[in-house]
Image (cartoon, rainbow, N blue to C red):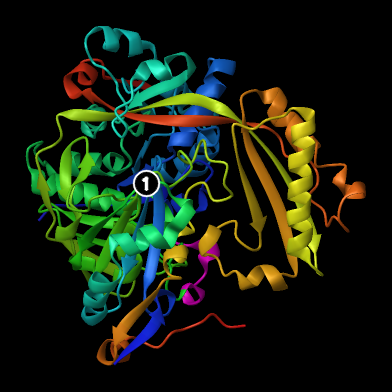
Amino acid sequence: MSREVQLADVARARSGDKGDLANIALFAPNQALYAAFLREVTAQRVRTHFGRFITGDVERFEAANVKALNFVLHEALDGGAARSLRSDPLGKSFGSLLLRMRIALSEEEAASAPPPRSPPG
Amino acid sequence: MTTVRIGAGQGFYGDTPDGAIAVAQRGHVSYICCDALAELTMAIMQKDRLRDPGGGFARDLPAFMRALLPITCSSGIRIITNAGGMNPAGAAAAVRNVAAELGISGLRVATVTGDDVTARIDELRASGIALANMDTGADLATIRDRVVFAVVYLGAAPIVEALRQGADVVVTGRVADASLFVAPMVHELGWSWDDWDRLGAGVVLGHLMECSGQATGGNFSGDWWNIPDMDRIGYPVCEVTDDGSALLTKPSKTGGRVTVDTVSEQLLYEVLDPRRYLNPDVVADFTSVELQQAGPDSVSISGVRGARRPEQLKAIIGHLDGWLGAAMIGYSWPHAMAKARHAAMLIDRLAERAGIHPVDKVTEYIGVDSLHGGAADAGAAAIANEVILRVAGRFESEVQARAFPRLATPLALNGPPFIGGGATPQPARALLGVWPTLVPRTVVEQSIEVSVAESPG
């Protein structure tokens, strides 16, 4: 049995820029979900998820100490912030873009997640 | 056990001085470190310097100093800032002028130079340093005639030298962000330049503090709505122990939140390989960092490992890369997206007929897909209450970049019903390519200079 969830409901993410590279750190709320992210959120899936927004490859690094996967997106920012034509030249919205991804969790993994929260109003 | 308390004062050019003021008043710190520089900032400052030889540093530096010096001088807090940008000497003179205005005589202001290698590019190339693009391998010759500036990221050593000479304020150009914070740790705690673990710890702490409120609840992607008082967020303050471990907190009576989660998000911000975070003085292993909640708004940081510093220093060469011309038009329900799409098609035709050809172009529908592109929810387009069309092109000349958005203005009367504002042409803007490269450290270090001068009495 598995259940599909959207990363936004179980994870946090922050993104930033370095030249034409963008990085996204994806944070898991616990060890079970960190292991699930390792299995589900592969560099290849992230590459596909970003589609035409990036032209280069995606690398994935592990930071188990903070239960995070760090994705480095190459040729991701239209040549870099200072030459980009985009509304978001720094890729600050890439973190939330990644959180749109849907992944499969086991029932146990899904049950371990804290309940999703929303801002009031 | 020796400790030093260091606070963050600025996270970018344009940041508010309020965070630094709270740190100075209630942070119980001995040092405030301010990071004012980014890749784009250097280009802006270089442009300022070409217009006015006395300019080229952060224009808000005098205002920061006017707010901070009365507090820091009476409590013995030393300030370190890279707001010198492309003109550290001019910036240091401006700081001394502010001190004189405030009646503070004998303020010792240090200038660190040697990062700016704009005038040395051809000399470096002639000596066999290719300055090839470290990402793509491309030859500098492809952009040489369009270069605006070239700066090398310096480490903490010249700032430590300035502190040794008794500087109250240290003004630098392109020093690596984290190194601004590493310098007072090395100076106060007596770390040696081959103590890789301690230097690595210093870089981790500097990295956590350099973006001011981003470590203390700003941009937090969790329950951001529960972060208290983001309008007066407390900037990070670290109490660093001589073994390199530290407590990260914020001043009392400020907003924000310091938890393992808020600090973790900043730990990986703008990081590539977390096992090898490159700094001029050390290669830090960010996967070795241990974070623990030590109390309310207090996180302990320990366990950091570092490795030998890189032999080459990173430099960036900014070069002109065309002009941005952008038009924006807003449309409302019903069929907001269809109207915006139709207007985009009309603008394409108008540009074609006028012979205004962008080198490349993005078409965005703000409210629908401008931030998330093709991954955005496609259903939003059909039901959008309003959509703002933005068409942005890269042009070879400023004239074309200015002419392009004017093509869209007549659509206010001649296009789909009805323009909801925003058809005013956006000002054209120069675009800047950033060329990352490497320079042997010895070539740079021999030209670094540190000088200290006092404000007049």
For residue B249, say whether it is visible: no
Q: State the quadrant of the C terminus of chain B.
A: top left
| Residue lying at 43% horizontally and 66% vertically, measured from the top left | B220
Who is closer to the viewer here, B354 or B189? B354
- For the residue pair B6 and B276, the one nearer the viewer reads as B276
* B316 relative position to B205: left or right: right
Name above or below for residue A61 compared with residue B253: above
Residue displayed at 60% across by 60% down: B369
Taking depth in this image into account, of A5 and B253 the one nearest to the observer is A5
Q: Position of residue A39 (x, y in %)?
A: 23, 73
Q: Which residues are magenta?
A: B224-234
Q: Judge whether A105 appears above or below B260 on screen.
A: below
User: In the figure, B355 relative to B201: above or below?
Assistant: above
Expressed as whole percent of the image width and height from the top left, the position of residue B195 reads 7, 42
Quadrant placement of the N terminus of chain B: bottom left
Relative to B404, is B210 on the left or the right? left
Q: Is residue A53 visible?
A: yes
Residue at which label 1 appears: A56
Residue B134 in magenta? no
Q: Amino acid at mark 1?
A: Gly
> Which chain does tag 1 point to?
A
Helix, strand or loop for disc 1 = loop
Query: Left or right: where does residue A56 sit relative to residue B55?
Result: left
Please tell me in which quadrant of the rendered image residue A116 appears: bottom left
Residue B269: image location, x then y, percent = 34, 54
